[in-house]
Image (spheres, grey):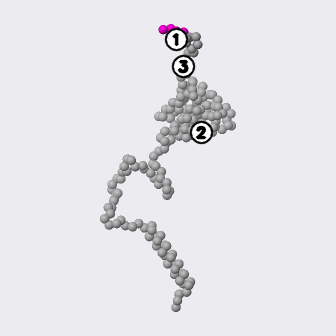
Amino acid sequence: MPPTSSLAAARFGLAGYLTTVLALVGGCASSPPPPGAPVVSTEGSATHAPADWIRVVRYGRYTLVELVPTAEQRNLLEQVVEVSIPSSAEAVTVGEGLRHVLRHTGYRLCEASPAEAALFRLPLPAAHRHLGPLILREALLTLAGPAWELQVDDVRRVVCFVQRPAEVAPPPVSPGSADDAEAQP
């Protein structure tokens, strides 16, 4: 008796299903190494990567992350900061602004010398209430201004400011004295 069309369709569907399952399972299995291929064993021996290899760890399917600290982690003054001092604080000083910037950076302000205390008491300009994103070193220098040099004690993680020496301008030359200087031998 000839098979009915529904029975043939069921057999074909079952055969197709089994073929698909076997193909998927077989595709995930690894094949044994070909005969004569060297077998490498790492048991009992320490494996050291060559010095020029970059050590990475896989995160997800397509992402490799290097196992090295970033530049900001090695040199804390290179970290990126964004400063937004609340406008609700009416009498904000440069010292308060510097402390606000240094918050969560690992650094603190040093004990203020008389010159630094004068800097720290100055009112914070409105232009400095919102800075960044900037490198921490640049943010500190911006808040202090061009008359101050940044000094950092990396051992104690302390930030200080030293007033730059006043530029000594040459004495003004009067028009008559320049002619007299040329006339003298």
> Dividing the picture into quarters, in which one does residue 148 lie?
top right
Task: Give whichever of 160, 169 is nearer the camera.
Answer: 169
Q: Please name the residue shown 52% across and 37% down the image.
A: 77
In the image, residue 11 above or below residue 167: below
- Give the residue pinned by disc 1: 182
Q: Look at the image and give the residue range highlighted in magenta.
A: 180-185
Q: Please name the residue shown 66% across and 38% down the image.
A: 86
Task: Give whichever of 180, 161 is nearer the camera.
Answer: 180
Q: CA distance from mark 1 to mark 2?
A: 54 Å
Q: Which amino acid lies under the numbered mark 1 shown in the image of this protein?
A: Glu
- Give the residue pinned by disc 3: 168
Query: Going from the N terminus, do you reach mark 1 or mark 2 first?
Result: 2
> Dividing the picture into quarters, in which one does residue 179 lie?
top right
Q: Please name the residue shown 52% across and 91% down the image.
A: 1
Q: CA distance from mark 3 to mark 1?
A: 25 Å
x, y percentage for residue 107?
53, 36
